[in-house]
Image (cartoon, helix red, strand yellow):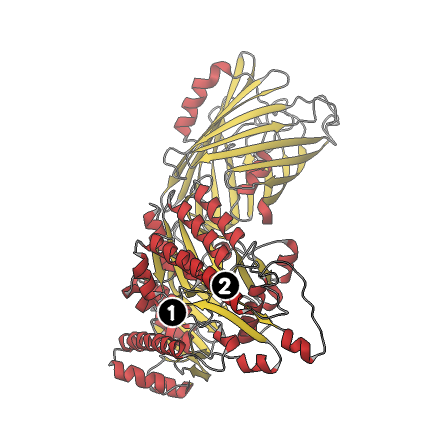
Amino acid sequence: MIGTRLSSAGAALLVVALAPVASAQLRERTAPVLAPGVPLSAPDDASAVDLNPSALGFLDAWSLTYVHVEADDDQALARAGDAARLGLPLPFGLALGASIQSVRPSGPGAEEDRGIGSLALGFAPSRSFGVGAALRWYGSRDGSIHGLTVLDLAASWRPAPSLALSLLGRDLNGPIGLAGIDLPASFVLAVGLRPAGTRVLTLDVAGGVDTDGRVGLRGAANVAVPYVGRLVASAELDGVEDDPTLLVTAGLEVSWGGLGAGGGAVFGDGFGDSPGWWVGARLEGVQRPGIPTRRYVADVEVRSSVDERGLLGLVVQLDRVLHDDRAAGVLLRFRSTGMGTAYAQELRLMIEALEAAGKPVVCHLDAGSGAEWYACAAATKTFLDPAGGVRLAGPHVQVIFLGELMRNAGLRAEFVRIGRFKSAPEQLTNERSSAPATLQRRELYDDVYERLTADLSRDFDVPAERAEELVDGGPYVTPEAVALGLVAGTADELDLDATLEDAFGDSYPRRAAPRTESSRRWGAASRVGVVVVDGDIVDGDNVDIPLIGIHMSGGRTVSRAIERLAADPTVAAIVLRVDSPGGSALASDQIWRAVMRARRKKPVIASMGAIAASGGYYVASAAEEIWADPSTVTGSIGIFFGKVDVSPLAGRLGITIEHYGRGDHAGLESMWRPFTPAERALVADKIRIWYRLFLRRVAAGRGMEVDEVHEVAQGRVWSGDAAVGIGLVDRLGGFGNAIARARALGGLDDDAPSTIVPARPSGLLDYVLGVGEDAAASGAVDRAGPALPPELRSAAAVALSFTRVREGVPVARMGEIVVIE
């Protein structure tokens, strides 16, 4: 049996054209229950278990199907009966399948009934290629087939959205006697075509030959019916020598979300005026086009820490809602996220986009932070737990200086820096900020405060002075927040139905997330590739310590990820997502060069998160466009190099260190002695060279003169708002805006998918197994927070980052983000 989909008229014409060369059915004794209209080249549900196990790896979600085929007792139908099939995708591109069938042939001289059990395994390392195998066991009162075991192998290739090819080997153990009876093996080639490149119309032609020299052919079609489902049909030519027989099926399948049902007729030679019939049903974890399903509200709960990857997952999930016509709105529940100001601004932009698309957003907070409330201020309504409040106290950061502590401990921090605003080393050398550092911090927080109050003035339609009073008057308990109009009212999280019905204007069911829709195209869909640079930038490969929540971006890992996306023909555009304070100048330059090479092949834009400073801005500057949040800590174009000298502590402890070497600067980087004056001068000369390289890189990427870059560099940081005015940033907008822009530049649909690389392990088990989390695929927003408090985690990350920078390589780093408390 060979299968695919065609309209009934098309199938009949196809069979007539092929009739002269057809002489036999290839699976007479081992054929399963008839699968009406299923394409052999690309079955898209659990029917792949018996028809083409290599297609199992392409399933979008689990699938359960049932079919019943029947004909009158006097009609010859060898594949009547019942079949239940299950397909289950697994991680790593694997998939399992199983089926149970009862085959009950009808007509004069019909064979004995038989039962069939099948197990199948599929593997698809990509969306374009898959392989599979199936084992099938038979039980029957016919002793010649009872106990029979057969093996099928298959391979599928989907080189384009309009073409699918499959090669199948069936009953392969028959000719060598392992099946237990004399059974020929058969080999089938199936070709699927989608003229429009989508599932609107699917055609399939297949032909095969067995080891006895017999030939068989089959054609089929699948035509989408808007707001209903699809028309399915197939035609097979069976027979021996000069007596071919024709078997045609036609019917209608109706889809409603993840449910499907259908039925139709079976007719052809030997049926006369009384055709047979079939009915089927399908239950699966994806949505199919068909009868419109009831609209719903996406219920999104964000628990625990929202870190760099957690924010991307949340934005991806909201983007799915934005492009899902079934979504009537969003219920957004924040629970102790600890998000910074820039992340709140990114979520505000997504909320505004949803509101503009006619999808109201309702927020529920228990004891909301200032940043959570700020994000929700753009929503239709916000509700507070009756015993909660809003911890609004304005933007804030605290900088810890360890200079005196280190000296008291017998540690001497020695750093040489370029740029009078390059203040990162001051935390190890000073007791307080220098005058330039104090100036830039004050200006940065002026910008953030001005943006915050301007947004709130617009949200609540009050003068800027009143918005400032609201910020200065916090924090608030729930009655105060309600009285001041900061929230719409109070609501118990477990008793929201009446509140939501009033807010959304109707009663809608709530779902945890938009359900996945079945693939519209064969192969890997054209998409946006996202490369994430998060945490400190270090030499070599990524560093992950899930137990304490530390992640660092390795220059080698990130560069290779960029190269792969640049070479991938399914990636139409690249977004470089930067959420990093910087790090190794060498690794930053490696990533910068990789981005510049990628720009020659496809559009590359940068999206900067909470911080993209120093080395973080270094890598972003290579992109064609840079997008930033208004509060993104930006710039810090400068370099420093240094070490911590522990020799004073060693002396106190009675430790004596002797140095031996040759050369004027031997031991320059040793932690057991200070720099000599000559060495400090030498280091200063070297980092000036690196600083000039930094300036040239930014100038080349931004299309500026080196002197122009130097004017806004010198280690100074800017808010995203200010960076637009001085040419360091092109546009204000979050990750969602950057994805939309990349889709436009790449000529993609508005809802084209995105792929986020490199993967990060999100827990200890992932780390042990070498599994990384893909935020775009998972849309995960329920993430376990790090074991360390944020301040300690940041300090640990700084210390660890210095150990991951090669000796002699200067550092381009800055480490503060803005938080609305």
In depth, the one of 477 and 691 nearer the eye is 691
Q: Earlier in the sequence, mark 2 or mark 1?
A: 2
Name the residue furthest top.
242
Quarter residue 326 falls in: bottom left
Residue 449 in the image: state x and y as whole percent. 34, 78
Residues packed near mark 1 inside 10 Å, few (<14), some (14 to 19) or many (20 plus): many
Disc 1, SS: strand
Residues packed near mark 2 inside 10 Å, few (<14), some (14 to 19) or many (20 plus): many
Residue 282 in the image: state x and y as whole percent. 52, 46
Q: Where, quadrant-wise, is the C terminus in this rendering?
A: bottom left
Query: What amino acid does circle 2 point to?
Result: Val
Which residue lies at the image location 53% right of the left edge and 44% below the top edge? Answer: 59
Q: Is residue 87 visible?
A: no
Which residue lies at the image location 62% right of the left edge and 57% below the top edge? Answer: 766
Task: Find disc 1 in the rendering and name its residue.
Answer: 717
Which residue lies at the image location 60% right of the left edge and 76% below the top edge? Answer: 411
The correct choice, above or below, for 639 with respect to 597 in the image is below
